[in-house]
């Protein structure tokens, strides 16, 4: 399920980053958690994969994650705008490895090392 257009929208786009605005009214936040919304880790990963796919311009699927560090909670009421930066992307034999950092203001929220396969 693609989350672009329902959970988030892209507000800025550059060569190596995307800034997105999260929708705190999305049904995901009604369950996770009522009155104190927190962006689930799996959602953060899905957004990172969707944005990487957009950057590459080809369909991809997540094969694995070699490293993930969730450093801060992303509450869409407190930090509605998050930047996903792709600091390093390696492509070899249909596999894509991407180092991704999520920031908002002066805060680093997560660091992801994604392994994807071009479909």
Image (cartoon, rainbow, N blue to C red):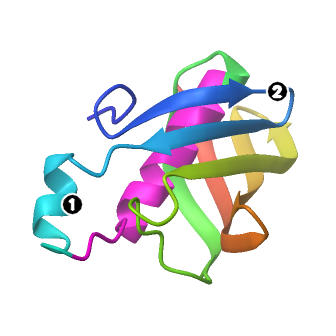
The residue carrying pointer 1 sits among few (fewer than 14), some (14 to 19) or many (20 or more) residues within 10 Å by Cα, namely: many
Q: Earlier in the sequence, mark 2 or mark 1?
A: 2
Residue 86, horizontal then vertical, whole percent? 79, 46
Which residues lie in the magenta part? 36-54
Q: Quadrant of residue 90?
A: top right
**What residue does disc 1 label?**
29
The vertical placement of 65 against 57, above or below, is: below
For the point 33% across and 71% down, which residue is it? 38
Residue 50, horizontal then vertical, whole percent? 51, 35
The vertical placement of 68 against 27, above or below, is: below
Decide if residue 51 is in sight here. Answer: yes
Looking at the image, residue 24 sits to the left or right of residue 21; the answer is left
Report how many numbered discs are placed on residues in the image.
2
- Position of the N terminus, as image quadrant, is top left
Residue 12, horizontal then vertical, whole percent? 69, 28
Looking at the image, residue 88 sits to the left or right of residue 113; the answer is right
Question: Dot 1: what SS?
Answer: helix
The vertical placement of 69 against 63, above or below, is: below
The vertical placement of 16 against 78, above or below, is: above
Q: Which sits in the foreground, 88 or 8? A: 8
For the point 21% across and 47% down, which residue is it? 25
Residue 82, horizontal then vertical, whole percent? 60, 52
For the point 64% across and 36% down, which residue is it? 52
Q: Which sits in the foreground, 91 or 50? A: 50
**What residue does disc 2 label?**
14
Tell me the CA gap for discs 2 and 1.
28 Å
């Amino acid at each position: 399920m693609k989350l672009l257009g329902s959970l988030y929208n892209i507000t800025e786009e550059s060569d190596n980053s995307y800034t997105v605005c999260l929708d705190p009214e999305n049904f995901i936040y009604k369950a996770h958690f009522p009155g104190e919304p927190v962006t689930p880790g799996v959602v953060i990963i899905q957004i990172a994969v969707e944005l990487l796919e957009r950057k590459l311009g080809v369909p991809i699927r997540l094969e694995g994650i070699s490293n993930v560090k969730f450093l801060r909670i992303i509450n869409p009421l407190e930090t509605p705008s998050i930047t996903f930066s792709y600091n390093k992307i390696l492509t070899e034999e249909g596999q894509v490895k991407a180092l991704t950092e999520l920031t908002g203001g002066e805060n680093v929220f997560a660091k992801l090392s994604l392994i994807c396969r071009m479909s």
